[in-house]
Amino acid sequence: MKKTKKEFIQFRCRVYEKKLLKKKAKKAGLSLSEFCLRSALDVKVVEILNEEQIEFYKTLIKYSNNFTSIGNMYRKQNPKLTEEVYALAKEMKDHLNNFKNDRQS
């Protein structure tokens, strides 16, 4: 059973504050009203990630897994350790170069 919101609250703010609130609400995928309500009630408001941020997050997860694997190889004194470290370092450098080139375009 969904409860309908019936009460109405108004508050004053400056033009730039309203623009900022609208921008933050949009990033969180919320209406301005819902964003203000959640903020006032100290409910965590999470920004929706864009495609670029999602890809970056996936890459970080991949690197985290790689470093865990390297740590396990090191612990076991695996001879492939050096090869894995160099491969991962090259992949990271390539990603950083791509990022740098994208920003300069």
Image (tube, rainbow, N blue to C red):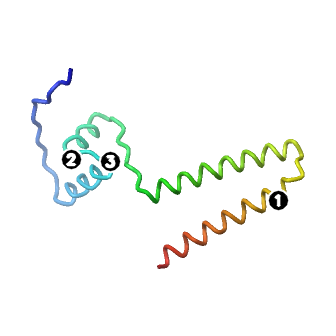
Residue 13 image offset from top left, x and y in percent: 16, 52
Residue 50 image offset from top left, x and y in percent: 40, 56
Image vertical order of residue 1 relative to residue 98, above or below: above
At 9% from the left and 35% from the top, the residue drawn is: 8
**In-image side of 4 versus 70 (left or right):** left
Hey, what amino acid is under mark 3?
Ala
Is disc 1 placed on a helix, strand or loop? helix
**In-image side of 94 versus 20 (left or right):** right
What's the mark number on residue 83?
1
**In-image side of 99 versus 10 (left or right):** right
Q: Please tell me whether mark 1 or mark 3 is closer to you in this view.
A: 1
Hey, what amino acid is under mark 1?
Glu
Q: Residue furthest top?
A: 1
Is disc 2 placed on a helix, strand or loop? helix
Is disc 3 placed on a helix, strand or loop? helix
What's the mark number on residue 32?
2
Disc 3 designates what residue? 28
Label 3 crowding class (10 Å Cα cut-off): few <14, some 14-19, many 20+?
some
Image vertical order of residue 60 relative to residue 75, above or below: below
Tell which of 58 and 20 is nearer to you: 58
Quadrant including the N terminus: top left
At 28% from the left and 33% from the top, the residue drawn is: 41
Label 1 crowding class (10 Å Cα cut-off): few <14, some 14-19, many 20+?
few
Image vertical order of residue 40 relative to residue 1, above or below: below
Residue 28 image offset from top left, x and y in percent: 32, 47
Mark found first going from the N terminus, 1 or 2: 2
Marks 3 and 2, how far apart at CA: 10 Å
At 72% from the left and 62% from the top, the residue drawn is: 89
At 65% from the left and 48% from the top, the residue drawn is: 64
Residue 69 image offset from top left, x and y in percent: 75, 46
Image vertical order of residue 28 relative to residue 87, above or below: above
